[in-house]
Amino acid sequence: MVRLVDKYRNEVAPALAKEIGRENPLSVPRIEKVIVSMGIGRAAQDKKFLEPAAKELAMVTGQKPVLCRARKSVSNFKLRKGQDIGLKVTLRRRRMYEFLDRLISLAIPRVRDFRGLDPQSFDGRGNYSLGLSEQTVFPEVDPNKVEHQQGMNITIITTARNDTEGRQLLSMMGMPFRT
């Protein structure tokens, strides 16, 4: 079993239920899914940027990414409807917990000049978003083989009712928020 699942079931869920005053164990907030996305604007002009980014995203998440296409044409960005502009992966269950464990314990501490995650990046419903400026903070990606630095957005979707519950859940899971 994944280490983070055990931590949630044995430590976080009982403590969180007591803290927010919920008796039903199914009403305690939990992490539902994690969405990892990469916007690759350079792929609109040159397709060679897309394949290495897809390989690296698949290595980091353990799942094949889905190609995202432009919905509208935007002449200022030299973008046409239907062009490939990004990649995304939706992680659930076991892969989600494995990815979060690697993110919390390995990747985030490797970020340069890291002083904690912004506690204001919640959306009002308990979901949290963060951005990483480069994919080389994950140990799976070999920095010597990376041709182009590529950032990624990570969104953690929870069943929390508000930001306070979401912040409590994620901080108990080990997310290093700034104080």
Image (spheres, rainbow, N blue to C red):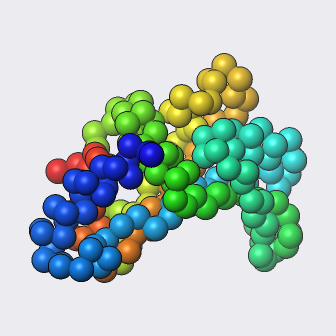
Q: Residue 39 appears at what percent x and percent y?
A: 66, 55
Total number of numbered labels? 0
The reply to whether residue 161 is visible in this rendering is: yes
In-front residue for pair 13/67: 13
In-front residue for pair 148/102: 102
Q: Residue 122 appears at what percent x and percent y?
A: 35, 67
The reply to whether residue 124 is visible in this rendering is: no
Q: Residue 99 appears at what percent x and percent y?
A: 50, 46
Q: Residue at x 86, y 70 (%)?
A: 82
Instruction: Please identify the quarter of the rendering in which residue 10 is found.
Output: bottom left
Q: Residue at x 74, y 40 (%)?
A: 55
In-front residue for pair 48/22: 22
Apparent side of residue 159 relative to residue 77 in the rendered image (left or right):
left
Q: Residue 102 appears at what percent x and percent y?
A: 46, 39
Q: Is residue 125 above or below residue 63?
A: below
Q: Residue at x 24, y 80 (%)?
A: 24
Apparent side of residue 60 relative to residue 145 in the rendered image (left or right):
left
The extreme top residue here reads 144
